[in-house]
Amino acid sequence: PCCGVPLEGVAIYATKRQVGVTNQNGIAQFELPPGRHTLTAPGCSSSEEVAEIVHGCPGTAHFKILASGELHVFLQDNSFDDDVKDGVMLCTNVENIPEDARPFVGAASLPGGCPPRPSIEQAGRMWKGLICVRVG
């Protein structure tokens, strides 16, 4: 996903509790109790938005959380019987990396790419995006 295209199926969290999933238009609708809530989309974005909900003030608030644009490269066992193979796999959401995946050690390049965010932990292992895709 790139270039400002809305993402479908992204879990949205308010203060570490899932409150919704984006639709085909990249929109998630949900209600929050009064208070301060940190809105996130873990695995898809490292950004956060803060929502201040005031008791007795009905209305709709709009927030935008942009995808990080990271590409994660990892190795996955694609062996069958005696034919031993490792597949080099690619995904954009670290939460989609299978538990049995192994880190890819090597180099990758992408024209117009930018450095990824620091390593993040998934399934008890540290994963570092190799490259980011610039939006726009």
Image (cartoon, rainbow, N blue to C red):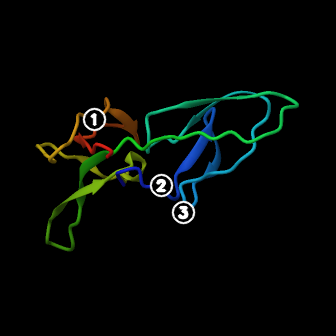
Residue name at image x 29 percent, y 51 percent: 101
Relative depth, front residue between 48 and 61: 61
Residue name at image x 42 percent, y 44 percent: 67
* Badge 2 vs badge 3, beta-carbon distance below 8 Å: yes
Q: Residue 59 at what x, y percent from top left?
A: 78, 40
Which quadrant would the N terminus be assigned to in this image? Answer: bottom left
Secondary element under disc 3, as helix, strand or loop, is loop
Given the image, on which type of amino acid does mark 3 rest? Gln
Q: Residue 29 at what x, y percent from top left?
A: 68, 50
Residue name at image x 63 percent, y 41 percent: 62
What residue is shown with label 2? 6
Q: Give the residue furthest to the bottom.
A: 81
The earlier-in-sequence mark between 2 and 3 is: 2
What residue is shown with label 3? 24
What residue is shown with label 1? 116
Secondary element under disc 1, as helix, strand or loop, is loop
Secondary element under disc 2, as helix, strand or loop, is loop
The earlier-in-sequence mark between 1 and 2 is: 2
Relative horizontal placement of residue 83, taking residue 128 as reference (left or right): left
**Label 1 – label 3 distance at C-alpha:** 27 Å
Residue mark closest to the camera, 1 vs 2: 2
Number of numbered discs: 3
The earlier-in-sequence mark between 1 and 3 is: 3
